[in-house]
Image: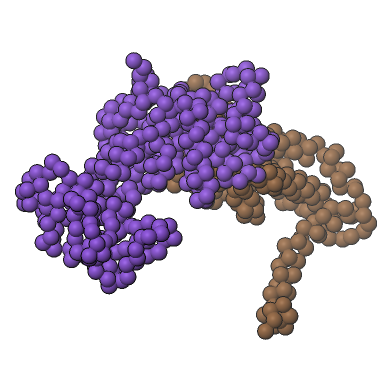
Chain colours: A brown, B purple
Amino acid sequence: MNEGTRPRGWVDRLLALNAWVVYLFFYAPIVLLIVFSFNDNENVGIWTQPSLRWYGEMFQDERVMGALRNSLIVAFFATIVSTVLGTMLAIALERYRFRGRGTLDGIAYLPIIIPDVTMAVMLLIFFFQAFGMLDEALGINLSAGLLTITLAHIAFCISFVAIVVRARLSQLDSSLEEAAADLYANRWQAFRKVTLPLIAPGVAGGALLALTLSLDDVVVTQFVSGAGSTTLPVYVFGLVRRGVTPLINAVSTVMLVASMVLVGISLGFQRGAEARGQRLADPEALLEEISAD
Amino acid sequence: MANPAVELAGVTKRFGDEVVAVNELDLTIEDGEFFSLLGPSGCGKTTTLRMIAGFEFPTEGSIRIHGKEMGLKPPNQRPVNTVFQSYALFPHMSVAENVAFGLNMTKVEKSEVQRRVSRVLDQVQLSKRADARPSQLSGGMQQRVALARALVNEPEVLLLDEPLGALDLKLRQAMQVELKDLQGRVGITFIYVTHDQEEALTMSDRIGVMNEGSLLQVGRSEEIYEHPASRFVADFIGDINLIDVTLNGSGGARLSSGAEIALPGGTTGSETQITLALRPERLALYDLDEEIPAGYNRVRVKVSRRLYYGDVHFYDVDAGIGTEIEVKEENRPGVELYEVGEEAYLAWSPEAANLVTS
């Protein structure tokens, strides 16, 4: 029997139908969200006429803009710090043998597995205790705010960065680093000239993932933020509880677009690396898996 | 007198408490020598090389390069360069950038770097591919880039870790000749690690045979091949017949079939079990009524197998000693063929045999 002209059975039809339904399930809410963000009516569900009214209001709303500014500040520092620390962690776990490495390796990715709420509660308690001790010991009076949010974001981003960088690093032939050392490069030069350029797509992918995670986080941020230090997702969450207006649709649409652009750039880095003839590490798959979460 | 290129004294390398990779190695490699470390995988030859390069450090013992103690010096502070088995070319750099890497790290002047890179690329016939990425080159070309990248630094010693392992047979044979010529031209000491005895025999000035972390024998190719000092060396290098005999007290020995044979001159002892090592090409078959050179040992055998290899015939013959003896006869005009089942005399000069213990 010719495989190419095999008649389609009911299983094939069912699978095809399933694919369409699943995609509808995925994307209908997104389409609705975007469409109603251009709705002129105060009520989300009732369509009157298209307008950019809510986008205008969004940009004039000081609380939205303030929350956005906070989000960007937190994300900026959280990304930089977690990328540097996560990359260092990946290198330590992948390349060096040291006492306790096995244990550290086993628990390195715990922050990814721990439920958000648990993470949030423990960070809250930790900050409360730490601030109390700092106040007592040194007289430094700290309170919850952007600093605690940033620290909390760093805490959960490091593991993600480490995973992505390590996937890349594990595919790197360690004799390349030996070759650099053999050719008179000291440790720093070998890292700077050989290791870093070769893991750069992984580092960039990890950084963008950290940025996305930080910009999107609600649960942890809500617990550790103090008064007056609201980030955009937390602000949106608060708005929803007071009743949904198309303003939320507009803000959500902007966040959605921003996230997609970031992920797009991240994938671009990976593809670029592939086109230059370097073998692709797994972070792309990981990235997709994690951001679907 | 100049110091030897490399001296290893009592070098031992342990991994953890159990594994002894290299065991009390003493070795002196002279300046300008092409020295091969030969042995099966896991024998410690690569670990030895990596200790000279500085990627591993000896648990005990000392390594000196031209008289200078290397101690715990990292690789970048040692006057040696390595050609890696996987080549380890930097994939994000062009051929020329790869070759220039070492010179740039040692702050050689830009114009000097350019001059030396283009000269060495000329030497390995890769001038036209200077701007190519390593991934665009064939295996043989990548091999030459790896060589150029090491040689351009004019190291005191060049370390080569099975550099021809990934090439196909024809290319490997061509590169053997090329490497040997190159070493003669540049006059740098080469330490070459291989498990391929043919490579070692054809290229080396001297060979060190290793097994299970120990250096068993060091010598010129001919010495290693013709006069193996132990059963392992005899067996590992080339084809060989290892025949258990008992010394008979009068300079000869008795096979397990009862036949008496003469041994190399000067052999003494009696009633001792010893192993006779005989190369197949040193054995010959004669018709039962044919004249055999005077002084040769002769043993009556029956041909049990004949294999045609093109340039040679291999015979397995039965001499009634339990194991079959392999005989290699060249496929030349006038050399008589023996059929399976045919009886003949197996003959050899007593001096062609080696006695090995353990």
Q: Position of residue B20 (x, y in %)?
A: 28, 40
Q: Residue at x 32, y 48 (%)?
A: B237
Question: Taking A25 as reference, is B38 above or below it?
Answer: above
Q: Residue at x 87, y 61 (%)?
A: A46
Q: Residue at x 84, y 56 (%)?
A: A36
Q: Residue at x 56, y 38 (%)?
A: B144
Q: Position of residue A102 (x, y in %)?
A: 40, 44
Question: Taking B184 as reference, is B286 above or below it?
Answer: below
Numbered label tally = 0
Report the side of B327 relative to A107 (left or right). left
Residue A233 visible here: no
Q: Position of residue A111 (x, y in %)?
A: 52, 46
Residue A240 visible here: yes
Q: Nearer the viewer, residue A202 or A215?
A: A202
* Quadrant of image for the C terminus of chain A: bottom right
Q: Nearer the viewer, residue B295 or A70?
A: B295
Report the side of B316 relative to A25 (left or right). left
Q: Position of residue B299 (x, y in %)?
A: 19, 60
Image quadrant where residue B91 sits: top right
* Quadrant of image for the N terminus of chain A: bottom right
Image quadrant where residue A221 sits: top right
Report the side of A39 relative to A168 (left or right). right
Question: Taking B281 as reference, is A19 above or below it?
Answer: below
Q: Nearer the viewer, residue B213 or A68?
A: B213
